[in-house]
Amino acid sequence: MKGIKKGGWISYKVDGIFSFLWQKRYLVLNDSYLSFYKSEKCNEEPVLSVALTSITNVSRIQLKKNCFEILRATDQKDNISPINSYFYESNSKRSIFISTRTERDLHGWLDAIFAKCPLLSGVSSPTNFTHKVHVGFDPKVGNFVGVPDSWATLLQTSEITYDDWSRNSKAVIKALQFYEDYNGFDTIPSNDNSNKSKDMKPLKTSTRYIINKRTNSIKRSVSKTLRKGKTDSILPVYQAERKPFPRSGENNNIINSTEDADIFREGKVYVSKENTANPQTNQLGKKEQQVIQHHLRRHENNVALNPRRVAPSAPAKKVHDDETKPSKQDLLELRDTDDSDEIIMKMKTVAIDVNPRPYFQMVEKAGQGASGAVYLSKRIRLPPNNDSKFLKSHCHRIVGESVAIKQIHLSKQPKKQLIMNELLVMNDSRQENIVNFLEAYIIDDEELWVIMEYMEGGCLTDILDAAAESSNGNKLSPLNESQMAYIVRETCQGLKFLHNNKIIHRDIKSDNILLNSQGLVKITDFGFCVELTEKRSKRATMVGTPYWMAPEIVNQKGYDEKVDVWSLGIMLIEMIEGEPPYLNEEPLKALYLIANNGSPKLRDPRQVSKKARQFLDACLQVDVEVRASVRELLTLNFLSLACGPDELKVALKWY
Ligand SMILES: Nc1ncnc2c1ncn2[C@@H]1O[C@H](COP(=O)(O)OP(=O)(O)OP(=O)(O)O)[C@@H](O)[C@H]1O
């Protein structure tokens, strides 16, 4: 057809009576119209033709993947074939939504439409950092120009400067894009009128980060990870943790949170009488304070980084041995919006549908996670012998053993899919460097109890928080290199197991490494785990915790299991320096630095051996092809420095 400037298959829907219908159409742009055809040949009358003179705005929206919205002036008439006119109410509805097959197509269309529509500036709003974006810095006026309002606000409150922009504008845009996708628009502060302008001055001086200090976010910010999807409704967390801590000598088993108190009132907690004599008990207040201080410190800057996207469902289906039971992929295959009943039903394929309270005696609170509290408990009875789920797991359980119980109030979890993920991965992953899942119970479809082996050493972060300050203000690691090498080696073994099973952990960091009293090291927190399949060996979803995130995630490229290797490298820096790189930067700047800076450098490389530096180098390669696999890491010399578990126990002595 003559005059065609661009053509291609898209899905579209109009904002009208049939607004739920997405239809596949061949879209054609010519000098005057944007037309939707049923076939590529364009030999029939178009289903809909929109005059380019009527288009007042085009913008990307999240309605569907690779989707944009076309807004038309309401006083314009479109050419609509009579047969299709019932789909379309020309003068009352103004939006047309178009979804393209790929991101690249989307940008092709945006550029072409912007170039052709007289009412548009000829410049599309920035939507993709891999594309030539239409945002710039105008040196004449000294302003960023063409940025959307939300970005303007973000830039204004960030520490990103004009120098950063000139050095790598693409990385700034990547960071902005990522940040906005990660947080969604509602986290942007509703500032006063001064922020309405699209053009703004770059910030040459440091500006304190102020985003998202709304009460809810602060409450959520103490969550140890940034898995806010799981924490949205767990509002008592902050209040609970801000309560005064038990003073030394007080009975630290006292139920010390609103949530705990509820449980207590309902008679759900069995407090051990012998427990008052337990020397560990008196440490609880101190331990909790340390954990919370750590959380507050870490998350002071992280407040605004709130993942919007949940861990994706596993893509391909495998044939399952047992046809009557859903496969793991089936179990994980759920929509983004959690369907509670469906998930609970699926949880029951793993969890025992029985009240476990008579089987355990609660001893003390061991920690607080985003989705619930973890209690040290004692097994006082075994469930009846006839429960197949209990018998099937080959774990050896004995009356009197200590276990950790994670209690999750399902009704309070907006993202049950993450919990389901965790349950499934734990259930399938029995390896000595993975925290051993024993069994799970579901109570009245309301509460989930996950029973795990008890890791009395707590998480690696607790040890690192004991780091002392050196005279020049740097942190001195409480671990020596052989202890670090041992922790790294054990983590590598756990990761090797996961990767061999095509599972990416996606949230490796010191918070998710637990230690026990024998000095054994195990990976935990499998909510973000995802399976790679042969069909799909790269993921594109953004999850994890930004400071530990590989650049390919921030850059929103496809990624694979090597993101865990990067995070492991960052965790080694944590062990050496007490914290991950850029922790003191405000979050948007940190994302910019991850996207732009390449491999992070040690503050003082001389403080570690060449072997440790080589190991870091192998982990922290920006080029994924060059970055080592876990298997390769295990052959590196640094790991030959590893001590035995006994030597790590020394580092646990503060307990
Ligand atoms: N098996 C365990 N043994 C001992 N302590 C544990 C165990 N699992 C967790 N904890 C403690 O409980 C705390 C919270 O653990 P949890 O896994 O719930 O944390 P989270 O990852 O922040 O939360 P969530 O998984 O709910 O998002 C940990 O920091 C740790 O101190």
Image: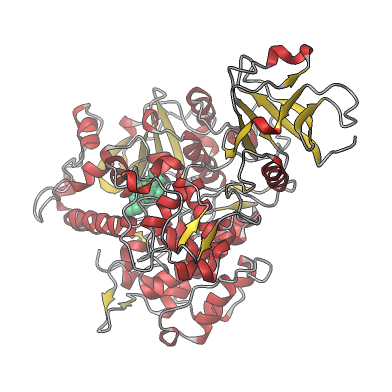
Q: 396 or 220, which lies in front? A: 220
Asked whether 413 or 368 is in front, the reply is: 413
Horizontally, residue 402 falls left or right of residue 284, namely right
Q: Residue at x 50, y 66 (%)?
A: 139
Task: Using the image, determine if residue 82 lies above or below residue 254.
Answer: above
Q: Which image quadrant for residue 29?
A: top right
Quadrant position of the C terminus in the picture? bottom left
**From where the camera sits, is residue 606 visible?**
yes
Percent position (x, y) of residue 290? 24, 59
Q: Is residue 513 visible?
A: no
- Residue found 52% across the figure and 25% down from its top: 345
Which image quarter is the N terminus in? top right
Q: Residue at x 29, y 59 (%)?
A: 297
Residue 489 at what x, y percent from top left?
Answer: 52, 69
Q: Quadrant of residue 596?
A: bottom right
In this rendered view, identify the residue nearer to me: 409 or 87.
Answer: 87
Q: Please tell me whether residue 201 is drawn above or below residue 112 in the rendered image.
A: below
Residue drawn 49% across the image and 45% down it: 527
Q: How many marks?
A: 0
Pinpoint residue 629: horizontal percent, then vertical percent: 64, 66
> In the picture, residue 382 is in which quadrant?
top left
